[in-house]
Structure formats: structure tokens, C-alpha cells
Amino acid sequence: MSRPSKKMAREHRLYSMPGDELASRKPVVVRRYRGFTRINHWITAACMILLLLSGFAFFHPSLYWLTGLFGGGQTTRWLHPIIGLVLVVSFFGLFVQMWRLNLPVREDAEWSRKIGDVIRGNEENLPELGKYNAGQKLVFWAMAGLILIMVVSGVIIWEQYIPLWRDFAPGLASIPARQVAVIVHAAAAFCSVLVFVIHVYAAIWTRGTIRAMTRGTVTGGWAFRHHRKWLRELAGRGTTRPAE
């Protein structure tokens, strides 16, 4: 049987994104993330960790010692918003690649209702899923919203980095506006910490998941157990190249 053309693959791609494929059939190995996506992910993760550490340094005087990790208070104050901009650009790269597959579908409601089976590992009671489950989608959209809130509030807080800020929006540069922005920024940062911890814990708890973002592949058994619709779609397109 001839291999489907790239155009046909795009037309029938409902649960996968470019780069997803069966890397090998004996044993079954599934390519879940391209190298570009993995690098993009780890840059985003690194930025999140650096922002949380530098942000905690300004959160309370008892945590000011964390500025020593960045070369002192002034250097930390200078680096924090710059790292924030890198985070925005990096996460936007992930967003462009993943937003479509993170849209809610009918199976997500059933998966959420059976969260007890998810926790107990009773996968046989759960619906067949595409590339992401409802929990993963929730983390994705929560981070997208929180990063947007943090960057908007952050720009107001650090308005001195934009010389024309007072001219275009003088009200937002006022002290009361900046005080509100600080509170909003801190609240969004706190929520992002919770989401980040949940994301990391879920990746460790679901054995075989971290491999997807380190090697880029998962086993066929993992894909069949957790994301069966995604695997079926890739199997329908056939094997394209040997596993690396």
C-alpha cells in the first residue's frame, strides 16, 4: 500500500499535529513531539522557574536573598521583566502549535466526570482520547490566561522601561493603577505556581510522560492506554521512518 501524501495527512489530522507519527512498529514507538517543540517547551519551563525565583525575591523581604542568584537586587530588577518577555515569546510558540488540539471536545466532559477512575488508574473506564486529556487542556489554557495577565500587569508595574508609556496611557502609569497591578500580578503568579506544580506532578505521576519531552517519543502501550484516538490516527498514516 502506498504511503499517504502529506496533503492527505493534513486533511485527516484531527487528533495530532505536525511531527506526530509512528516512529517504529517493532517495537511500537510513537513520536509525540518534534525537537523544535521540546526545545520550545524547555525554554518556557526555564523562564517560568527563573521568573518565580526572581519574583519571590521581591514578594517579601525574607526572600530577598534570592536576588543573590541573579547577581543582586538591581540586576534582578532588570532581568525579571526581560525574562518575562522571553517567556511570552516562547509560550506563544507553544500556543501556535498546540491551541487547536487543546480545544474542548465531548470526551473531555466524560473524562472529567470520571476523575476518580483517572486517579485510580482505571483507564478501561475512560473514553478514548486524542492527543490531550481535559486535565492537560486545563493546564494549557490556565497558563495562557495567567501569562497574559502577568505580562499586562507587569508592563504597568515596570512602566519605566517604556519611555512613551505616560504619553499613550497616563492613567495606567499612576500610583493607584500600579498598586492594583502589583496585586493582580502577584495573584496571577501565585496561581501559575499552583498550575506549574500540578503540571510537573502529573507528568511524574503518569509514568512514561516525561520521556515525551526528553526523547520526543512514547511507547505504543503508553499511547494506547492514555491517548487511543491519537494513536489510531497515527497508525492509519503508517510508519514514516525508523526511531532515532
Image (cartoon, grey):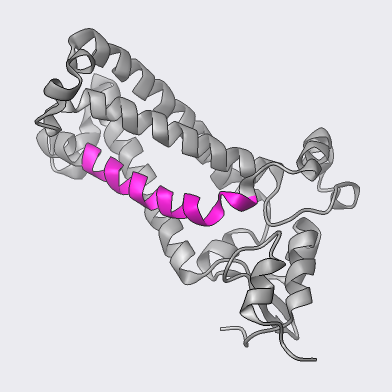
Image quarter for residue 142? top right
* Left or right of residue 165: residue 151: right
Q: Please tell me whether residue 96 belongs to the stretch shown in magenta.
A: yes
- Residue furthest to the bottom in view is 1
**Quarter of the C terminus within the rendering:** bottom right
Return the residue nearer the eye: 203 or 237: 237
Q: Is residue 43 left or right of residue 32?
A: left
Q: Quadrant of residue 3?
A: bottom right
Q: Nearer the viewer, residue 127 or 53?
A: 127
What secondary structure do most residues of the magenta stretch adopt? Answer: helix
Mark count? 0
Residue 187 location in percent, x, y?
42, 21
Using the rendered image of the protein, determine whether residue 82 is visible from the camera's viewpoint: yes
Residue 153 spot, x, y in % from top left: 32, 25
Residue 93, picture quadrant? bottom left
**Residue 207, placed above or below residue 9:** above
If the image is split into quadrants, where does the N terminus sit? bottom right
Q: Residue at x 47, y 63 (%)?
A: 38
Q: Which region of the structure is painted magenta? A: 81-101
Residue 65 placement (x, y as % from top left): 21, 32
Q: Residue farthest to the right?
A: 125
What residue is at 15 percent from the left and 26 percent from the top?
165
Quick check: 109 left or right of 145?
right
Q: Identify which residue is drawn at 47% across, 70% down.
A: 35
| Image: 63 above or below 181 | below
The reply to whether residue 204 is in sight is no
Tell me if residue 240 is in the magenta stretch: no
For residue 119, side relative to residue 210 (left or right): right
Query: What residue is rendered at 42% in x and 59% in y?
Result: 40
Q: Which residue is more in the foreground, 188 or 4? A: 4
